[in-house]
Image: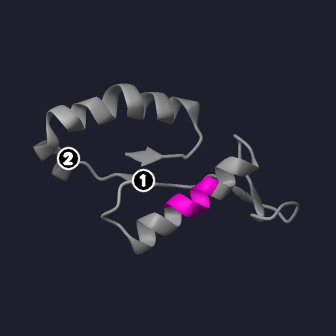
């Protein structure tokens, strides 16, 4: 399963389907690989150096989530 930080469809899926399911059946989480991906496009017009479909804030949050995923893979953000 992949996720984008500010995608409304992802947020809806996560909050209404995925999270309640994992709370109810925590043992099944070991069978789901969860990772963030970034769809940001390189650009130099802002501090992040990227743009995204849902705006600069999404590109910034993607960067943060990818860092968490890399440096603290057991932390769920």
Residue at the limit of the structure toward the right, as seen here: 45
- Percent of width and height locating residue 29: 20, 47
**68 or 9: nearer the eye?**
68
- Percent of width and height locating residue 43: 82, 62
Left/right of residue 45 with respect to residue 2 in the rendered view: right
Left/right of residue 11 with respect to residue 58 in the rendered view: left
Q: Quadrant of residue 54?
A: top right
- Residues rendered magenta in the picture: 61-65
Whether residue 19 is in magenta: the answer is no
- Percent of width and height locating residue 55: 74, 44
Helix, strand or loop for disc 2: helix
Mark 2 / mark 1, whichever is N-terminal = 2
**Residue at the image point whose x is 58% and y is 56% from the top:** 62
**Residue at the image point whose x is 55% and y is 46% from the top:** 5
Task: Please identify the dominant SS of the magenta region.
Answer: helix
| Label 2 Cα neighbours within 10 Å, binned few <14 / some 14-19 / many ≥20 | few
Q: Quadrant of residue 40?
A: bottom right
Q: Quadrant of the N terminus?
A: top left
> Can you tell which mark lies on residue 29?
2
**15 or 29: nearer the eye?**
15
- Percent of width and height locating residue 20: 27, 30
Please determine whether, in this image, residue 70 is positioned above or below residue 35.
below
> Can you tell which mark lies on residue 69?
none
Residue at the limit of the structure toward the left, as seen here: 27
Q: Are marks 2 and 1 in contact (CB under 8 Å)?
A: no
**44 or 57: nearer the eye?**
57
**Mark 1 — residue?**
77
Query: Which is closer to the viewer, label 2 or label 1?
Result: 1
Please determine whether, in this image, residue 44 is positioned above or below residue 3.
below
Helix, strand or loop for disc 1: loop
Q: How is the image coloured?
A: one colour
**Residue at the image point whose x is 15% and y is 42% from the top:** 26
């Amino acid at each position: 399963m992949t996720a984008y930080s500010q995608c409304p469809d992802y947020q809806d899926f996560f909050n209404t389907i995925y999270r309640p399911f994992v709370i109810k059946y925590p043992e099944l989480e070991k069978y789901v690989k969860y990772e963030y991906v970034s769809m940001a496009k390189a650009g130099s017009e802002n501090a992040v150096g990227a743009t995204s479909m849902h705006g600069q804030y999404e590109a910034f949050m993607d960067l943060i989530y990818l860092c968490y995923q890399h440096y603290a893979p057991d932390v769920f953000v």
